[in-house]
Amino acid sequence: MRSLTMTIALSMVALAGAACGGASNSSDGGGSSGGGSSPSGSAGTGDFGVGAGAGPGGNPGSGGGSGVGSSGAGQACASQSADAGLQQVYLAFAFDVSGSMGANNEEWHDKELKWDPVVAATKQFFSDPESTGLMASLTFFPGPDQRRMCRAGTYENPDVPMTALPSQEFGQAIDDVTPRRERDWRMGTPTAFVVEGTNSFIEEERRQNPGKYAVVLVTDGYPQLCEGSDSIEAVVRHVEAARANGVATYVVGVANPPVPDAPENVENLHEIAEAGGTGEAFIIDTGDPAQTTATFKAAIDQIRGTAISCSIEIPPAPDGRTFDKQKVNVTYTSGTSDTPTTLVYDQDCAAESAWRYDNPASPTSIELCPSACSRVQADPAASLGVEFTCEDVIEIPL
């Protein structure tokens, strides 16, 4: 996995003075579209399960010429390309630095079994070249001032602001917050307040930088040491409100190591993840530091992939023309290949590697169906193409 920012090449068809040959399925140099340009949206096989049909310039359907089909007598079509990005992904990390993560005041608070391997994996994620294109922030909880730890405002300004990855700033911040002495660990787990404060930060941030935002909560236990509104139920309410506002919440629970008398500490974290729209929490077993690091990294990698959007806003039709929903092709190019393949249009998503409109009657965005979405999320260096054609290439169900 190389980059979270995928580029969409928008092959926009414009009126041009040079003539082009006939319809998009013409066999001459003006508009062969390979597979995937039939009115039914069918396609031949390719490395993505659909037809490949790219001309020398990398534009599907160019057939080596500049045109992709005629729009009427006296008019001709030529391809133009413009670049746009998929929705930028922002991950706001809320990271538990309470004494139960490593103060060694109980056998199950063993620093070598919990804090050290989790931190190693976290630092690797933030500095990993595979995180290129992702934006992230980092907020530690509880805050350093015990008197203010149970206030949402304490967590509205992250310890590391939204920063492009990879970055060494996160690792340095984690090193700085790691206590040098066991007695210096912070006490308390104000989960409800850090979630509330982090979501307030996100609201302010996305006013300036629109995109896809999510919270990643990393903790080893239940809320404690804040009276009143700090409970799993309170956390769930904040997470549900964020979800209703388009912000998902992922949860990474760090379980106590398997030592005698260690209490269960992560089971009800699943309630938070479910309320946040992300299924179950990722539970990290401890006891074997190497395995803990590997498991934590796998969880973060999965979050990194699923956070990628599979929805593309339909751009304006070129040259001021009226958008025609039946004159659209969508292509996919793997991050390891220069050859695009044409995806199948299927509004029911019954076909493999397909796409559909959000609303076929009045579409505003293109959505990848589950199999195509999974492929793209596993290959975030891939690119998607949206091509406006001159002839009908798909049929929209009534």
Image: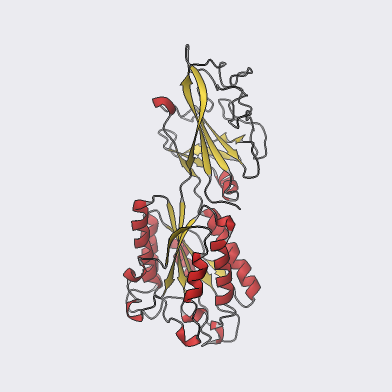
Q: Nearer the viewer, residue 57 or 280?
A: 57
Colouring scheme applied when the structure was drawn: secondary structure
Left or right: 369, with 239 as reference point: right
Q: Quadrant of residue 129?
A: bottom right
Q: Is residue 56 above or below residue 292?
A: above
Q: Position of residue 229 (x, y in %)?
A: 33, 73
Direction from residue 224 to residue 33 in the image, left or right:
right
Q: Position of residue 271 (x, y in %)?
A: 46, 66
Residue at the spot 60% in from the left edge and 75% down from the top edge: 286
Please state the horizontal and vertical placement of residue 143, each as a whole percent of the image: 39, 75
Q: Quadrant of residue 298?
A: bottom right
Report the front residue among 155 and 345.
155
Q: Residue at x 34, y 52 (%)?
A: 207
- Residue at 57%, 58% in the rendered image: 302
Reply above or below: 154 against 348: below
Q: Single out the residue that lies furthest toward the top.
A: 73
Percent position (x, y) of residue 386? 51, 34
Q: How many marks?
A: 0
Q: Residue at (56%, 41%) from the top-left corner?
A: 383
Q: Is residue 203 visible?
A: yes
Residue 351 seen in the current view = no
